[in-house]
Image: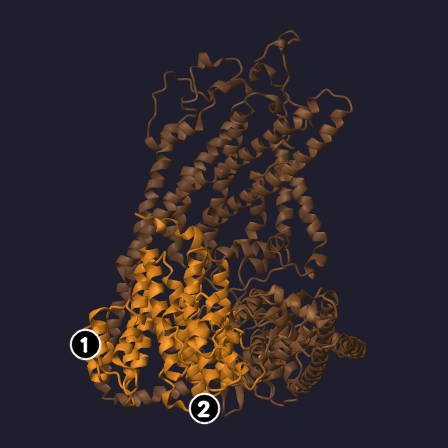
Amino acid sequence: MGHLFRSEEMSLCQIFLQSEAAYACVSELGELGLVQFKDLNPDVNAFQRKFVSEIMRCEEMERKLRYIEKELKKEGLKIPESFDNPKAPAPKEMVDLEATFEKIESELREVNTNAEALKRNYLELTELQEVLRVTQNFFRQHGSDRHNIIDDAQQALVNIQEDRSGSTAVQLGFIAGVMQRIKIPAFERMLWFACRGNVFLKYEEIERALEDPHTGDEIHKMVFIVFFQGEQLKARVRKICEGFRADLYPCPETGQERAEMLNGVSTRLEDLHTVLQQTGQHRHRVLQNSQKEIHNWIIKAKKIKAIYHTLNMCNFDVSHNSLIAECWAPVRVLDQVQNALQHGTELSGSNMPSILHRMKTRETPPTYNKTNKFTKVFQSIVNAYGVAAYREVNPAVYTIISFPFLFAIMFGDMGHGALMFLFGLTLIIKEKELLAKKIDDEITKTFISGRYIIMMMGLFSVYTGFIYNDIFSKSFNIFGTSWHSNYTDDDMKAVNLQMKPETCFDKGGPYPMGLDPVWQGSGNKITFTNSFKMKLSVIFGILQMLVGVMLSIINHIHFRRWLNVICEFFPQLLFLGCLFGYLVAIIFFKWVVYTAECTQCAPSLLIHFINMFLVKYDAPKNETIAYQCTASVTSDQVGCNSQTLFYRGQQSVQIALLLTALFCVPCMLFIKPFVLRAQNNAKLRRKAQLHAVSQTSLVHDEQDPSVDVVQTGDVAVTINGEADTKAAHHEEDEEEFEFSEVFIHQAIHTIEYCLGCISHTASYLRLWALSLAHAQLSEVLWGMLFKFSLAMDLKYVGSIIIWADFAVFASLTVAILLMMEGMSAFLHTLRLHWVEFQSKFYAGTGYLFEPFHFKEQMVPTLEE
Amino acid sequence: MSFSELYFNVDHGYLEGLVRGFKGGILKQTDYLNLVQCETLDDLKLHLQSTDYGNFLANEPSPLAVSTIDDKLKEKLVIEFNHLRNHCLEPLATFLDFITYSYMIDNIILLITGTLHQRPITELIPKCHPLGSFEQMEAIHIASTPAELFNAVLVDTPLAPYFIDCISEQDLDEMNIEIIRNTLYKAYLEDFYKFCEELGGATADSMCEALAFEADRRAFIITINSFGTELTKEDRAKLYPRCGKLYPDGLQLLARADDYDQVRNVANCYAEYKELFENAGSNPGEKTLEDKFFEHEVQLMKNSFMMQFQFGVFYAYVKLKEQENRNIVWIAECVAQRHRAKIDSYIPIF
C-alpha cells in the first residue's frame, strides 16, 4: 500500500564504468531491471556510435539464427518451449557463439545446396519420365506409324492440304517438353501467331504436383509436344519455348528407344530417391543438434544486442578509459544496483570498481509505481488516462475498491455477478497455463490481463445484487417481508389493489438488509427503485468527488503549495459541501425521519433543492410544519405537502449555505493570482536592490570583473556536475511572470470546478440509468423469453421446449447481459473515474519509468 | 453533374488511405543527411533500418552489393503496388494498369536492344523492371522486324493498340528502336491522358497536369537528343506526344529547332519551363536539365497529394517512390565507389 500510494522516489545517478567491466555491469543491471538509462548522445547517428560494429555482429548472428529457425520450421521441428534464462555471455564467448552459428549455417547451406541440386536432378528425371510416358501414349493412340500421326496432325491444322498424298512426303519434326500449367494458354497463342498456324501442339497435364527444388512449393506442370515442319520453324519454336521457360527433353523417334529410355530413367529415379532420403536424414541430424540450443541462443543474441545498445547511450571518457552512464533508479533499490555493479565488476575481473554517484537535478524524474499482478491492472487503468506526475497521489489505490463498486452499482444482479465472478476466478486459477500459452488474440489477451478486475467486479455485483434483491430479475425472500396484506380472499379478485403503508407495513421495522421482496410483484416497483437508485448514485457520486477533493490537499501539502491549500482546497471543499453535501444530508434526513405513518408529508427533495437556488420559499400556511409528523394526525390536518418546509429554520440555513458557496467562488478566482503577483513584485524589487548594491560595491572595491569570472570558472571545474545544474536552476528562475496568463488560467480552473461540481453530480446519475437499464433488460429476457415456456401446459413436449428455450435464454443472457452490458458498465465506470473522480486532484503529467530489463528479450522470437 | 467525390470513399477510400500512409514512409531530408554520412553500405543498411524500410535488408549476408539494394527497393515497391492493384476496383484498376504500361514499354525496348546486341535473353530478364513484366516478354527475341514483333508478341498485350503506328517491315536497328519507343510512349501518354480526362473531377485536374508535364518533357528530350542524328525533322515532329502544354504551338516551334538555344527559346515562352532551362547546365555546381525536370516532377507529385478523392495520389506515389529508389541507389553507388564529390546530387522529396 505504501508503495502504491505514491510513485517511488527516484534519483538520477551517474555510473562510472571501467571500460573492461562495462559490459558485465550492464548485463547485471539488465538482469536486475531497475534502472532506466538516459541517452547521452541523442544527436549521434545510429552508425556513428561507439559499439556499432558489435551491434552489426549481433545482427549478423540474428540473421544466422533466423536462417536456422526457418530451416527448423521447414523441417517441421518445433522450437522447444523452455523457461531457461541464460545470462548474457561474456564478450569472449560471443566469438565462440559466432563461430558456432557460422559453422551451422554453412553446414546447412551446403546440405541445402546439395539437396537442391539433387532435387533438381530428381525433378528433371521425373519430368523426362512424364514426357516419355505421354509421348508413348500419344504415339500408341495414333498408331506407331508416323505417317498416320502426320495425317492426324495435319488434319488438326487449319490449312489442310488438299492432296493427302503430297503431305505424307513432308518430314515432320517434334519437340517435347514440360512447362508450367498457367503459361500454356499464352504459349499456345504465341505459337499460333509466331508460326502462322503451321505447328501442331498437343499437351497433357502431369497429374501429381511437383516440388520446386528451391522453395519447396508445389508446382503444376504440363507435358507438351509440338510438331512442325522444317528447320526454320524448329529454331523459332525452340526460341518460343525458351521464352516461356519450358524445359525441353530429348525424345527418341522410335517407340522402342523410348521404352528403353523410360526404363533407364526409372532406375535412375529410384537411385536418386535413396540418395535424397539420405541427404534428408543428414539434414535432420544437423538440425536436431541446433534444435535444443536455439532457444538459448536467440535469448543470448538478443541480450548481447540489448547490452551494446545500452552501452551506446553512454559517454566515453577517454582520459579515464571509462564509460559514463546516466540513469534513473528508485532510491530504495540503490543498494541492489550497487551490488549488481560490484558483481559485474567481479565477473569481469577488473580491479577498479564501478562507481555509482547520485546527482542533483532539476529534471522531473520518471514515475515508477511498483505493482504486483493484482494491482497491475488497476494501475494500467489509471496510466491509460495519464501517467501520474512524479510523487503525486496515485488514484490506483482507491480505484481498486471504487472501480468494482461503481461497476457493481450499474451491474447489480446476484446471478450475473456470480457468473462473472466465476469466470474471473477460473482465469485466475488457470493463470499459469494461460500465461505460458502465447495467445495472439487481442480480445482474449484483454480478458486474461483483466482477470483480477473481472473477478472483483463479479464479487461486488453479487453484493449489490443482494442489496437490490435481484437475481436474474427475481427476488429472494430471506428474512421475511415486512409488509402484510389486509385484504380478504374476495378482495383479491380485483385487478388493482393498494397496500397503504399506514396499515400494511409491519411495526417490526423494515426488511433487515436489501430491498424488500414485496416490491418484486408490485406495480410501482420501478418508481420505487428509481427513487432509491437515484439517491444512491447521488450519494456515492458526491462521496467520491469529496474523496477526490480531500486527496488534493494531500498533494498540496506534499508539494508544499500552501497557497493552494488556502485558495483552492478550502473554497472547493466548502463549495461542494454547502451545496451537494447539504443535498446528501437532507437525503439521509428524509430516509431517517419519515416513517410509514406520514408518507404524505415527505418532502420532494428535488424541488426543495431547486428552490434553494432560486431562493423561493412559500409562506407556510400553518404554524405546524411537516417534520412534526406523527401517527395520530393525518396529513390533511397538518396541512403539509411535499413542498412545505420540513424543518425549523430551513429557510435561513439554506440561504446561509447558498451565500457561503457563492462566497467561495471569488475566493477561488481572485486570491491566488493577486498573491502571486505581489510575491513576484517583491522579488523583482529585491533583485533590483541587490543589483544596485553589488554595482556600488564593485565600484567601491574597484575590482576587475574579469578576475572574478576566472575564479568562478575554477570553482565550476571542481564541482563539475553541480555547477551545471545550478546554471540550469538560474535560467529557470528567470521565467517571466505574466499576470494575465495566471489570471486566465485561474479563471478557467475556477469555472471548471464550479460547473464541474454540478455537471459531475448529474453525470453520476448514469449509475442509476445503467442499473435501471440492466434490470429492465434482464426482466424482459425473463418475461418475454423464458416465462412463457414455463407457463405452457404440455406433457413431455413442454420439457423439450423448456430445454430449447433455456438454451436461447442462457446464450442471450451471456451475450447481452454479461458481455454487452458488462462492457458498457465498464466503460461508464472508466469515465466516472477518469473524468469525475480524477479531475479533482490528478494532474497526470508524468512519464513512465521504463527500466532496462532483459525480460522483454525473454520471448524467443526474432521478429520485431 | 457528377457526385463521384461523394462515392469515392466507398470504392477507393481504403486504398487512398493506404497510399497516403505509404507516403508517410518516404524518406525525409534528415534521413538523406544521415545517409550521405555513411562510410560503408552496412552503415547505409543500419540507417535504413530505422526508417520505414525496416528490416528489408536484414536477411542479406554482409558484403552488400548496390544491385541487391536496388533489387530489394524495387521489390518493396512492387509488393506495395501489387497489394494496391489486387485490392482495387474499377476504374482504379485500369488506372493502375496504365501506370504499368510505361514500364512495359521500357522493358520491350530493353529486350529488343539487348537481342540486337546478341545478348542472351536470360541475362536481360533480370534487368527488366518487375512492374512492367508480362507473359510474352521473354519470347520477344524471335522478332526481327516490327511487324513480327507486333504479330507474334505484342498482339495479346495491352500495348497492341499503341503499336499500330510503328508496324513496318524494316529491320530493327538502333534508330528504329528509338522511334518505336517514342511512338509507343506518345500513343501511351495520349491514351492515358484521354482516360484521365474521361474520369474527370479531381483526378483529371491532377493527372492531366502530371501527364502534360511528362509529354512536354519527352518532347524536349527528343528534340535535344535528335541533334546530330539522321532523324529528319518531319519524323521528329511525329514523335511528340500531343497532350502537353506545348501542343500545338510549342511543338511546331520545337519541330523547327536546330540547336539547344532554339529549344531554350521555345521553353522561354512557357513560364514553368523557362525556369527549368535557366541555370541548367552540365558544369560542376550546376544541375543538369534532367535533374531539373526530376525536381519539377517531384514538386508536381507532392502537390497531387494536396487533393483528395482522386487517383493522382497513386501515380504520384509510384513516381515519388521511384525517385526515392534512384536517390538511394545513387547514394549507395557513391558510397560503394568512394566517390563522394557528387553524393549530394540526389533529389530530396520531403
Q: Which quadrant is home to the N terminus of chain A?
A: bottom right
Image hue for chain B: orange
User: Which residue is at the front of the view, B209 or A201?
Assistant: A201
Q: Residue A651: image x %, image y %?
A: 37, 28
Q: Circle 1 sits in a helix, a strand or a loop, which is it?
A: helix
Q: Position of residue A731 (x, y in %)?
A: 34, 74
Q: Residue furthest top?
A: A490
* Whether residue B195 is situated above or below residue A178 in the rendered picture: above
User: Mark 1 belongs to which subunit?
Assistant: B
- Where residue A276 is drawn, which disc sits there? none
Return the disc, 1 or 2, that comes first in the chain's sequence.
1
Q: Which residue is mark 2?
A: B337
Mark number displayed over residue B268: 1
| Residue at mark 2: chain | B
How many labels, in total? 2
* x 53%, y 75%: residue: B139
Q: Nearer the viewer, residue A519 or A174?
A: A174
